[in-house]
Structures are given as structure tokens and as C-alpha cells.
């Protein structure tokens, strides 16, 4: 079983991202579940969401404590929450930031760090506003690159089927993020 | 059939949509709200042909369903926790009036202290209202149970309402792949609602009038008791029929998992059962003979099945996600009551996961180990044990 944890802020679409990713894996024949941290959400406050993926039906009905991947949608969260909590030692942390993995390494004590400037990509594709770009679809393209577990084409199709508007722009943002992801520390 | 990625609440909304109720009356409450939001969206989009009645409380929601159903139409509603308990009076009215209303309940803890997380006290406390109660294990079961509940409840030898439970967030807000059946199949399976009686301006009559003590009040209640007993047979039959049409086989009132040659069997309702199956597989690989009885229907209570299940093990561990203050949690006392005179094997009550405290495999392994020790010793160490209280070294 693969367990993925998303960190974002209320309103950034972390929960939707967890569902779109689940859908992409589902389209490739996997069993999936996706859920938010069981709580009460507020705009701007830290939000956590999860995706589980397996080759067989998922019966686990409890929270994820030791994820294989962590995805951070908002770089400001690195100072606000312990994004590495429980992350497996050989698991990847993928961060939306303008910084390189080497620069992030000064802030985070972890080997496998990947970064992508999803914010600029979202702005380029007019997703959300300049002030509050929606990065949740772009970051999924980066996840496809980092994990190698789900094809970028599948992620783009899952986005096209799930996004309420600007389906193609969202899918292309994922592709751009896929191409722009920097994987460090291997 | 189309597979969709749906949360438990979306699955409930789809179950309702496919069953074609004519009236939906509801009041929002976390974590149920997304059920009625989705239904409102279906109706607004013209995908569901129902009248949506916005009301000022859950008590009124159930009153509106009762009134509508009394005119001879199918109804649906949904609620949680304080909304459900506010409905209590009307729940008893609905069943007493023999109206097969179907309702989704998202199990949420009762305040104080405030908690929106899962805990089954809200629905367990409705045990005596005359409603059938189904506890779901996954989102597919949430959807399918609604369809089956209409079919069972609307039979003229039953005529009783059903509530279908989802553990808050663990199902309500968790998305899984769900088979959404074709409308035509559901139409054929559920059929048009044919009321046994209804309010009709052309044929005036009254329901629910005064009955003097020497009148047939007891007989009305006795008929309800018979109908609830009869429902056991209908439930078993309808799950078979459902399997033939939709290809998914539900286990009637109780699901057994690896109970053969078990030393200890856990009895539980809701999503804990799902996680427990993985734990059982892992423990079985280590040679620990444990099994599970998942109670789908708490009402009618599956006493016959439990009398067979207890024969298969040396002890039963009853795991409750609620507590009945004064003596033991409800599933425990019900099970013991059903088994009185049928077994002298040890039975222990584990109280777990109140207010949404997470039930992980680690917790379940510890419970199973305790159960196996009791099975071996033949003696219950503590009759009722609260699992994992802060500072309790037994469970840390």
C-alpha cells in the first residue's frame, strides 16, 4: 500500500487534489481511498489530506501516520507544521517552492526532497488569481514525476474529468510541473 | 454500472437519488450536510424529481417526512448526532405510524464536550424507536443499503422505517470507488411506492387518533413487534435478491469473517470491522486464531446468528463505539442478553474510539491479544474495559 499526505491551506484545494490523485490511480486499475484530516476546515488554516493506493481493496479505516510521500502545496507551511512527521526515511517530500532541493535541505532534515514552482505555473495558466493561484493540479503533475507510480497522461485525464473549470489549462499545468520538477538528494 | 470515486455522503445521496423519493426534508448538520447538499444539487439540476423541503430543525424534517409519507409518497432525510436526538419524538411517531421512511445517519459524538467526530451513541440511543438500523462498513454498502432498505421497509408485512449509519469522516468524507447501479435496475428492484394506506381527500380518514387503555394500543405495538421479527426474514431474502440483480452479496444481518475454528471472535459494528479484517489476516498468519462478527443490523437484532457464532469460539469480545452509562455498552448487553442460556463462554466488553479517537491496527492487535488470553484462561479479567484511556499503561 502507498500512503500519500498533502499539506495545504484551507481554500487551496488539497482535499480535491487528494481525490483527483485517487482518481488517476483508479484509472490505472488501482484500489484507492482519499480523505481529509478529520476535522473542521477554515480558509487559510493548515489543511491535511490523504490518498491511499493499493493493488487490492483497501480495508484500512484509520488515519495515515507514516506516509510514503508528502506533498506540500504552500511553502509557508514548512515553518508552520512538521511536514516530515512520520514520513518514511526513504520517502519523498515534494514542495511547491521557488527554491531548489539543496536550498530546502537547509530547512528540512530529509534526504529525498523534490521541488517545483507550481505557483508560477498556475499563474501562467491563469488558475486562480495572481494573489491566490490554485496550485493543486500542477502539483499532481510533479507527483507523477517524483513517484513514477502514475503516468502523467493519466493524471492529466483525471484532472480533465475532475476540474470544474479550465480543464485543459489545469491539465497543462500538471504537464508543465512534471517537466519542471527538480529531484534532489538521491 | 459506472464506477465513481465517491465519499460516503455522496454515496448516500446517490442511493437516495436512485431510489427516487418524492420528498426530501432535511436540516444541515456536520458531518451530514454534504448528503443533503448533493441531493439539493441533484434536484436543482433536474437529475432528481423530488420536492426539497427546507425546514427549521431536524424535528421538523422528520415531521415533514411523516406528513409527506402519509400522503403515499416515498421520502428521504439525513442527519447526525444532535439532529438525530432532536428527532427522537418524531422517530417513534414515524415507526408507530408504520411509515417506511429511509434516513442516512452519519454517526457523530454527542456534546458536551463538542465533537464532530465519530461515535455511535447518537444512533444507539435510538434503539427503542422502532426503526431498523444498518451500520455500514464502506461507501458501497452505504449506497446499496439505502436501495435495500426501501425494498424491505415498504413491504406490506413490514412497513417500518430504516436508518443507515456511516461513521463520521471515516466514511462520510472518505472517497472510494463505488459502483453506481443503473437507474433501470434500481427502478425494477425498488419499484413504485405502494402505500398500504394513505391520506386521500376523496376518501377522508384520520391516523394516529386517541386509543383508550382498553382499546387496541397494545395490539398496534404487538403488530410492530411481529413486523420487526418478520423483517429478519425479509432482510435475508432481499440481500439474496440484491445479489442476483447487482452482483454484490451482503451478509444479511451479520457478516462473519474467518470465524471457523476461531479461539476468539470480535463482535463490532461499523468501520472498525473493516480495519479488523486486515488485522485478523495478519494475526492468522502468526497462528493466532481470531475472527470477526460484523453486526450490520442492530435492529432487528440478529440473536439467532449470534447463538450460532458463539459456538465457534472460546470467547467473544464485544467492541462498542458508544457507552450506555450505568452498565455496559449496548452491543455488549444486547449480545449477552441474546446468549443467556445458550452459552457459558466468557464475554467481555471493550469500549473504544469515543469522540472519534482513531482505532488503528495497533489498538486492535492489543484487544485481540487480550481476547486470546481470556479464551485460554477461560476467565474474563475485567467485564467492561475502556480501551486506551490517557495514562492507562495497560494499553500504552
Image: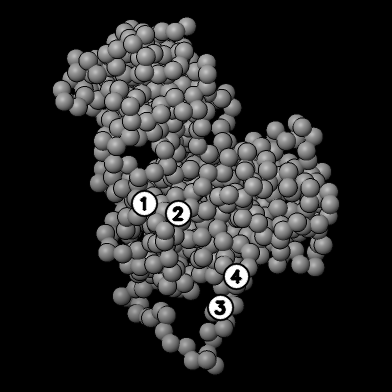
The chain carrying label 4 is B
> Closer to us: mark 3 or mark 2?
2
The chain carrying label 3 is B
Give the distance between the C-alpha atoms of the residues marked 4 and 3, in whole angstroms: 27 Å
Question: Which image quarter: residue A15?
Answer: top left
Q: Between disc 4 and disc 2, whose residue precedes?
A: 2
Q: Which residue is mark 4?
A: B326
Pick out the residue farthest to the right: B377
Residue A58 versus residue A48: which sits nearer the camera? Answer: A48
Could you confirm whether marks 1 and 4 are on the same chain? yes
Q: Are marks 1 and 3 in contact (CB under 8 Å)?
A: no
> Closer to us: mark 4 or mark 3?
4
Q: Say what secondary structure mark 1 lies in.
A: loop
The residue depicted at 40 percent of the width and 67 percent of the height is B87
Relative to A111, A116 lies left or right: left
Residue A168 versus residue A39: which sits nearer the camera? Answer: A39
> Closer to us: mark 1 or mark 3?
1
Q: Between disc 2 and disc 1, whose residue precedes?
A: 1
Q: Are marks 2 and 1 in contact (CB under 8 Å)?
A: yes
Task: Say whether residue B92 is visible.
Answer: yes
Q: Which mark is residue B108?
A: 2
Image x and y of residue B202, in percent: 32, 75
Q: Between disc 3 and disc 2, whose residue precedes?
A: 2
Image x and y of residue B119, in percent: 50, 54
Q: Is residue B327 above or below residue A123?
A: below
Could you confirm whether marks 2 and 1 are on the same chain? yes
Give the distance between the C-alpha atoms of the residues marked 1 and 3, in whole angstroms: 34 Å
Q: Are marks 3 and 2 in contact (CB under 8 Å)?
A: no
Q: Which mark is residue B221?
A: 3
Amino acid at each position: 500500500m502507498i500512503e500519500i499526505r498533502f499539506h495545504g491551506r484551507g481554500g487551496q484545494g488539497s482535499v480535491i487534489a487528494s481525490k483527483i490523485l485517487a482518481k488517476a490511480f483508479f484509472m490505472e486499475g488501482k484500489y484507492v481511498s482519499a480523505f481529509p484530516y478529520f476535522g473542521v476546515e477554515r480558509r487559510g488554516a493548515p489543511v491535511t489530506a490523504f490518498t491511499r493506493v493499493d493493488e487490492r481493496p483497501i480495508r484500512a479505516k484509520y488515519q495515515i501516520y507514516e506516509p510514503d510521500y508528502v506533498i506540500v502545496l504552500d511553502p509557508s507551511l514548512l515553518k508552520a507544521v512538521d511536514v516530515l512527521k512520520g514520513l518514511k526515511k526513504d520517502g519523498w517530500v515534494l514542495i511547491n517552492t521557488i527554491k531548489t532541493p539543496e536550498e530546502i535541505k537547509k530547512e528540512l532534515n530529509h534526504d529525498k526532497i523534490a521541488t517545483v514552482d507550481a505557483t508560477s505555473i498556475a499563474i501562467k495558466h491563469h488558475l486562480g488569481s495572481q494573489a491566490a493561484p490554485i496550485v493543486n493540479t500542477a502539483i499532481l503533475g510533479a507527483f507523477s514525476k517524483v513517484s513514477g507510480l502514475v503516468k502523467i497522461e493519466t493524471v492529466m485525464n483525471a484532472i480533465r474529468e475532475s476540474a470544474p473549470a479550465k480543464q485543459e489549462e489545469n491539465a497543462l499545468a500538471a504537464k508543465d510541473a512534471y517537466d519542471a520538477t527538480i529531484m534532489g538528494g538521491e | 454500472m459506472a464506477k465513481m470515486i465517491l465519499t460516503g455522503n455522496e454515496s448516500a445521496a446517490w442511493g437516495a437519488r436512485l431510489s427516487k423519493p418524492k420528498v426530501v426534508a432535511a436540516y444541515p448538520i456536520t458531518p451530514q450536510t454534504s448528503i443533503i447538499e448533493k441531493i439539493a444539487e441533484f434536484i436543482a439540476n433536474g437529475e432528481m424529481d423530488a420536492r426539497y423541503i427546507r425546514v427549521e430543525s431536524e424535528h421538523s424534517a422528520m415531521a415533514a417526512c411523516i406528513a409527506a409519507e402519509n400522503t403515499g409518497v416515498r421520502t428521504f432525510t439525513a442527519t447526525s448526532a444532535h439532529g438525530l436526538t432532536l428527532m427522537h419524538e418524531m422517530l417513534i411517531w414515524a415507526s408507530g405510524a408504520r411509515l417506511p421512511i429511509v434516513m442516512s445517519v452519519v454517526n457523530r459524538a454527542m456534546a458536551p464536550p463538542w465533537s464532530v467526530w465519530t461515535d455511535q451513541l447518537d444512533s444507539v440511543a435510538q434503539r427503542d424507536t422502532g426503526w431498523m438500523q444498518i451500520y455500514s462498513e464502506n461507501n458501497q454498502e452505504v449506497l446499496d443499503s439505502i436501495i435495500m432498505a426501501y425494498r424491505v421497509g415498504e413491504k406490506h408485512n413490514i412497513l417500518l422505517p430504516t436508518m443507515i449509519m456511516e461513521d463520521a469522516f471515516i466514511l462520510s468524507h472518505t472517497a472510494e470507488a463505488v459502483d453506481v447501479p443503473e437507474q433501470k435496475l434500481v427502478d425494477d428492484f425498488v419499484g413504485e411506492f405502494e402505500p398500504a394506506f394513505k391520506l386521500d381527500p376523496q376518501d377522508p380518514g384520520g391516523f394516529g387518533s386517541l386509543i383508550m387503555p382498553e382499546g387496541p394500543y397494545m395490539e398496534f405495538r404487538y403488530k410492530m413487534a411481529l413486523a420487526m421479527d418478520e423483517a429478519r426474514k425479509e432482510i435475508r431474502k432481499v440481500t439474496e435478491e440484491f445479489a442476483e440483480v447487482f452482483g454484490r452479496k451482503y451478509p444479511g444481518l451479520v457478516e462473519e469473517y474467518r470465524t471457523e475454528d476461531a479461539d476468539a471472535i470480535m463482535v463490532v459494528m461499523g468501520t472498525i470491522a473493516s480495519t479488523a479484517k486486515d488485522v485478523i489476516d495478519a494475526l492468522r498468519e502468526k497462528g493466532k486464531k481470531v475472527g470477526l462478527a460484523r453486526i450490520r443490523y442492530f435492529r432487528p437484532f440478529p440473536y439467532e446468528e449470534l447463538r450460532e457464532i458463539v459456538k465457534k469460539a472460546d470467547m467473544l469480545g464485544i467492541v462498542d463505539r458508544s457507552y450506555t452509562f450505568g452498565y455496559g455498552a449496548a452491543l455488549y448487553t444486547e449480545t449477552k442478553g441474546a446468549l443467556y442460556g445458550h452459552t457459558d463462554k466468557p464475554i467481555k466488553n471493550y469500549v473504544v474510539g469515543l469522540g472519534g479517537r482513531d482505532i488503528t491496527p495497533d489498538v486492535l492487535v492489543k484487544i485481540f491479544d487480550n481476547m486470546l488470553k481470556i479464551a485460554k484462561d477461560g476467565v474474563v479479567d475485567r467485564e467492561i474495559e475502556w480501551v486506551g484511556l490517557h495514562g492507562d499503561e495497560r494499553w500504552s
